Image (spheres, coloured by chain):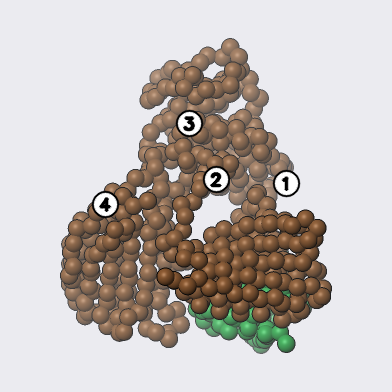
Chain colours: A green, B brown
Amino acid sequence: MRDFNCEVHLPATSKELAVLRLAGVLDSYSLPDLEKTLQDLMRDNRCRIVVNCERLRFISSAGMGLFLGTLGEVEKQGGSLSFAQVTQPEVHDAMSLLGFFEVFPVFDQETEAIKKNLRS
Amino acid sequence: MTEHRSAHLTVPCDSSCLEKVRKFVQQSAAGAGFNRTDVGRLVLAADEVCSNIVKHTYRFEPNHKLSLNWQEREEGAVLEIEDDSPTPYLPSPTDFDLHSKIKYRHGNGYGKYLMRQAVDDVQYETIPGSHNKVSLIKFRKGHEPKKKQDLSNPYDLARARSYSLLALFELGENLSRQQGVPELMKVFLYAVMGRLTTHPVALLAPISAGAPFGVAGEIGLSRRLAVEDLNLPRHGWVVESLWAQRGPFLVEDFRRLRIPEEEMETLEHLQAALLIPLFLINQLRGILCLGPKRSHQAFSEEDVNFVTLLGDFVLLLKEDIERGRLLAGGVPARGGGDLQAATRATVARLAKPARESHINLDLSEDVPIPPVRMEAELLHKVLLTLLTHVLYLSKEEGTLGLRLSSSAEQGTLTLSYIGTPLGFEKGKPGFNPLIDQMISGGLKLVECRKAIQGAGGRITIGVKGEGVTLEITFPLSSST
């Protein structure tokens, strides 16, 4: 059984915003599940995405590449992709090695990220 | 004598193989005494190798195997990963451009780069018709071998030769060969070098046969080089540097500079070429890379490549200056900073603001430290910035203890805050804002971290009982 879960939360206050709460391990095997979720969000015009990584224990380059590719897609729709609660040191380090934090906004709290991504 | 452990794992390539690989590496690396970060990086690198094999070599077919061999040594560890495929496993491309991939939002192709960042060395071996082996090597802290300079990389060559004109010339030649960039590139490179250093440099520009060697004029020249000094090709080119101020450089002007070689002897064109301010290089890059704003502007791929290369070179030089590897004068940093003097000066400077915040600055162990591998001026700046930020984050009414110590190879300044300072509360989200700021925010702290790391130093922030310690370590100038 794969150790990965992606909980999708669609705030009622916005038709564009989606919050993904990741848990477990994002590697080559669990990647397709997340890829499908992101594609579904794009199709539904949910182009402001907040990814909560508090319970994410591992991320590989495939996962990070997926987010970078998705960033390109949401940007075309005038959207954004940001991260919240990247607290697991191994995940933080992996993202740092790839220069993630120079590309994506990262927030300490999910609520903070949501607030920043709600369109006024 | 230390026992050197080894361990082995063979896994079938089913959907749980990566998890088993990660667990095996995590246990082996932790058991070998690697710290949490290095354990995580070994796990990451192993996962990248195995993921590549599973995805590209095996195409997720489960009836293959992966074999892992962990060998611990005194200086570190080696993890060998073998597949069972006769298809050769390709090493990383040497022209991988992370910046470009991220800029254009490429969604894949980062695995091998990440692997190389995570471990100290990666070696590939193909046994023809049989299988492949990838060896991941991680050294323990303090056992890293001196990195061999890769002088096939033109930027490293320029650094190795201290940005000498000859090195810049070779850099230009290499870039011309590799990228097909016209000769004009060299002029811009040298112009940029001139901008970043305080010494006007003799510049090189193509001239046609018969054009005058050297240009004397009302603008003073500071240095000349004989053609023989540079060992230029027979129909090489030399003119001399010019310093004059001009107005902003427009994109239209830039496009006009792509002029035939025989026109380069025109002094005016050369003057214009020399005067592009640094920020405009990035502006130009932005304009050319993001696309024309007006429909009548059409930028060729060559224009984009040219400015991108120039911008990259400028950024490399800037980074070397920021990290203290290169002085503003264009010479390599040699170190020799006095850590004791810098600490005393910083304590004296911050005594008043500390008193006003009811914080007692206590330099309890004040010992002379041999010269460290950071320039004196930069050392003072770094310590002042760091301590100012520590004071800023500290709670009122406490004691900030400072202690100097040294070993055969390094000098250390340890700051210890007694009591839990504001902002360092455990369990609070964003715990240790000082760490976060040094990693990704607070521009001055990021610069401090880069400067310390550039000098081969280290910053460690830890929690000890009720207090927080910040330890800054510098290698001594005399240590290798």
Q: Quadrant of the N terminus of chain B?
A: bottom left
Q: What's the amino acid at mark 4?
A: Pro
Label annotation for residue B371: 4
What is the C-alpha distance between the residues marked 4 and 3? 31 Å
Q: Position of residue A63 (x, y in %)?
A: 67, 72
Q: Is residue B79 above or below residue B182?
A: below
Crowding near pointer 3: few (<14 within 10 Å), some, many (20+)? some
Q: Do discs 1 and 4 belong to a common subunit?
A: yes
How far apart marks 2 and 4 lie (CA) works out to 28 Å
Q: Which element is circle 4 on? A: loop
Which label belongs to residue B74? Answer: none
Q: Secondary structure at mark 1?
A: loop
Same subunit, labels 2 and 4: the answer reads: yes
Please give the residue where the numbered disc 3 appears in the rendered image: B165
- Distance Cα–Cα, label 1 vs label 2: 44 Å
Decide: few, some or many residues near mark 2? Use Cα within 10 Å; few <14, some 14-19, many ≥20: few
Q: Residue at x 77, y 67 (%)?
A: B84
Cα–Cα span, label 2 and label 3: 19 Å
Residue identified by numbered label 1:
B295
Residue under label 2? B150
Q: Foreground residue, B21 or B155? A: B21
Identify the chain of the residue marked 2, using the numbered disc in the image: B
